[in-house]
Amino acid sequence: MQGGFEVRVGGMNTPRRRCGDLTQTLRATSLRWFPPRRADVTAMHMAEVGGVGLLCRLRNRPDRRASPCPSHTSARPSDATPRNRLTCWYVYLYRLYQYCMIAVDGRMEPHRQLQAERDREVVQAVMKLTIFGATGRTGRQLVEQALGAGHEVKALARDPSRLHVRHEKLTIVQGDVLDPAKVEEVVAGTDAVLSALGHTSTSTKDVQTVGTRNILAAMRKHGVSRIISLTGAGVADPEDAPKLWNKAITLLLKRLQPDVLADAEAHAEAIRASGLDWTIVRGPRLTEGPKRGSYRVGYVGKGTGAAISRADLADFMLKQATDDTYVHKAPVVSY
Ligand SMILES: NC(=O)c1ccc[n+]([C@@H]2O[C@H](COP(=O)([O-])OP(=O)(O)OC[C@H]3O[C@@H](n4cnc5c(N)ncnc54)[C@H](OP(=O)(O)O)[C@@H]3O)[C@@H](O)[C@H]2O)c1
């Protein structure tokens, strides 16, 4: 008869503990026998976030029969067959390793750290990116995050001194987005364009539309196809299902900032008609909060919130440079 064991160390809701509580956790370890039919080739380890519980299931391989011991309620190595003893020691050692990780840097999610390390190891495609509005609040986040990800960045800035970042992979070209020649200079040879252009006290009412038309023309001329452009959630999209309060906000915007909204809408129309691989990223209220790395992507009235930090918005925009999920779409990114 083939059988298997489930070894549980601690519980699913085990509270946060440090190294000193290891004994307590190990006492809570239990060993459970599986019915023969469930025995097959599987090994599963689940370490939980926060609860720091570990579920380790080891089942016998069909060709290696282990003696089932249904009477065991403790996973003490001495209680088990040689094979199961090995399993128990493995669990103990893995557990010990987890607690050491916690003790070393005070974090409760060692397996998440490992995942993060694995993620960092994934070789990212290094791209050449052109960023417009780089001196703005979202633009600066874009520049910093793009450089942090190893990309080469070209930025057009009316006043380069407003961009405090200096990096060997950053080229700042002084110029205005209303100047087609300057726009061409930064777009030529790039892989993707990111625009966080906005209205400032020194910009024209139609800066976003005229500037974007210049960008689109330069892209067509130089064979650049990918553009990700930022605008507000007040710009409508066919996928939206606005609720009453969404309509109220849009009405308010139309009354308070008619020129900004009209320019944003015209810029979106120009992009939609461009024939390029565009993504219009729409944001609700933008904040200066930190980058959380998690946010919702939806449409007005469908799975969206009222705010997002510029750091997270930049994170989403940057990811679109290497992701075609939202090509020809205008999602709203929010918490
Ligand atoms: N504020 C919000 O809550 C909110 C919400 C949703 C969406 N949005 C949209 O998000 C976008 C970015 O917002 P933000 O607050 O990060 O922008 P911001 O800080 O106001 O920055 C605007 C950027 O556009 C640049 N710019 C303006 N005119 C230019 C020109 N003629 N030539 C070159 N660059 C020019 C500015 O450069 P200079 O440094 O030279 O002025 C600056 O870098 C805007 O389109 C905005 O409408 C904002």
Image (cartoon, rainbow, N blue to C red):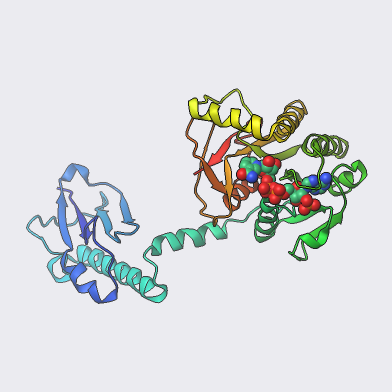
Q: Is residue 129 visible?
A: no
Query: Is 328 located above or below residue 181 in the figure?
Result: above
- Specify the quadrant of the image occupied by residue 146: bottom right
Residue nearest the viewer, comparing 153 with 286: 286
Residue 51 % position (x, y):
29, 59
Residue nearest the viewer, comparing 62 with 51: 51
Residue 52 % position (x, y):
30, 61
Query: Is 291 located above or below residue 244 in the figure?
Result: below
**Total residue callouts:** 0
Residue 256 % position (x, y):
65, 34
Q: Residue at x 27, y 51 (%)?
A: 61
Q: Residue at x 30, y 68 (%)?
A: 95
Query: Is 236 located above or below residue 179 in the figure?
Result: above
Horizontal side, residue 311 vs residue 60: left or right: right
- Specify the quadrant of the image occupied by residue 327: top right
Q: Is residue 53 visible?
A: yes
The furthest residue to the left: 71
The furthest residue to the front: 255
Residue 139 % position (x, y):
70, 51
Horizontal side, residue 76 vs residue 99: left or right: left
Q: Residue at x 73, y 39 (%)?
A: 227
Horizontal side, residue 80 vs residue 311: left or right: left
Residue nearest the viewer, comparing 99 with 140: 140
Query: Is 7 located above or below residue 295 in the figure?
Result: below
The furthest residue to the right: 181
